[in-house]
Amino acid sequence: MSHHLLQGKKGIIFGALDERSMAWKAAQRVVEEGASITLTNAPIALRMGKINELAKECNAEVIPADATSLSDLEDLFSKSMEKLGGKLDFILHSIGMSPNVRKNVPYTATNYDNFQKTLDISALSFHKVLQTAMKLDALNEWASVIGLSYIAAQRTFPGYNDMAEAKALLESIARSFGYHYGNKRKVRVNTVSQSPTVTTAGSGVSGFDAFFHYADKMSPLGNANADDCANFCVVLFSDLTRMVTMQNLYHDGGFSSMGVSQAIVEDMSGR
Ligand SMILES: NC(=O)c1ccc[n+]([C@@H]2O[C@H](COP(=O)([O-])OP(=O)(O)OC[C@H]3O[C@@H](n4cnc5c(N)ncnc54)[C@H](O)[C@@H]3O)[C@@H](O)[C@H]2O)c1
C-alpha cells in the first residue's frame, strides 16, 4: 500500500541483481511510494542479472557503473540527473562482494589483493559515491543516502571473513562523510544494519543457513526480511526522518540487543 511518502522524489538504487536482492525490493517500494529512479549495477552483473525486468516494472533507466570507478560514477550521476530531470533526493548503496569469501580463503590466511578488493567494492565505493555526488552537486538539500551493513562490523562472525572489516569501514564512512555533507548541504548519511537475509551475497557466506536460523531464534521479532528492509529505506528516504544522520541503525528484529533467548536456551538444553 502506498502512503505517497516519496512523491516527486528522485533517486539512484545500486545493487539490484535478482528478485532476492535487497535493492530489488527497495526499488519496487520507492517507486510504489511515488519516487522516480535510475537503477545501476556493475556491467558484468547487468549481463548476468535480470535487472531489465525490474527496470520495466519501475519505469526506470538502467545505467551501468562499476562502483569502484570514479569515471563510471560521474557518468551515472550526470545521466541520472538528465533522465530524472534534476538533482537527486536519495541514494541506496546496496553493494557487497568479497573475493576471499567467494574463493573460500580463510581469514587467517587472507589474500591481501583480494582483501583490498573487498574493501574497495564493499566500503570505499560508498565514499566514492558520496564524493562524486558532492563534486557534481547532484543532491538536493535534505537528501538521504543509505548504505547497507551487517552487525559483523561490531561483533565477530567468523564466516563473514574480511567483509567484517568492510562493514566497519562502511559505517565509519557514513559518520565521517555524514558530518561533511550535513554541514555543506544538509544531506543525511546513514547505514542500516540488516538481519541475515537470503540473497546471492548473503548465502555466499559460509554457514549462512545456520546463522540465519540462529539469528531468527535469537531475535524477539525474528529476522527482518528484504521487504522489511525496503520499508525501512522508504522511511529513511522520506521527509519524516529529516534529522537522522551519521547513524548505524539496527534493523534486525532486536538481535543486536540480545544476550541469549529462551529459544536458544531450550535448543542447547537437550545436549
Ligand atoms: N543478505 C544478507 O544477509 C545481508 C545482511 C546485511 C547486509 N547485507 C548487505 O546488503 C547489500 C546488498 O546485498 P544483497 O544481500 O542484496 O545481495 P546481492 O548479491 O543481491 O547484492 C549485492 C550487489 O552488489 C553488486 N556489486 C558487486 N560488485 C559491484 C561493483 N563493483 N559495482 C557495483 N555493484 C557491485 C552486485 O552486482 C549485487 O547486485 C550488501 O551491502 C550486503 O553486504 C546483506
Image (spheres, rainbow, N blue to C red):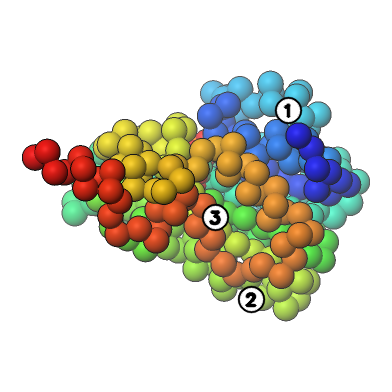
Q: Earlier in the sequence, mark 2 or mark 3?
A: 2
The residue carrying mark 2 is 179
Disc 3: which residue: 192
Provide residue 236's location: percent of width, then percent of height: 68, 55
Q: Which one is in front in this view, the residue at disc 1 or the one at disc 3?
A: 3
Q: Secondary structure at mark 1?
A: helix
Tell me the crowding category of disc 2: few under 14, some 14 to 19, or many 20 or more residues within 10 angstroms, Cα based: some
Residue 100 as seen in the image, left or right of residue 231: left
Residue with the mark numbered 1: 55
Against 20, residue 225 (above or below) is below
Q: CA distance from mark 1 to mark 2?
A: 33 Å
Secondary element at tag 3:
strand
- Disc nearer the start of the sequence (1/2): 1
Please report the residue visible at 43 percent of the width from the left and 42 percent of the height from the top: 222
In the rendered image, which quarter contains the N terminus? top right
Relative to residue 247, is residue 77 drawn left or right? right
> Which amino acid, by three-letter code, is at mark 3?
Val
Q: What is the x, y in percent for residue 18?
A: 56, 27
> Where, quadrant-wise, is the C terminus in this rendering?
top left
Q: Is residue 8 above or below residue 250?
A: above
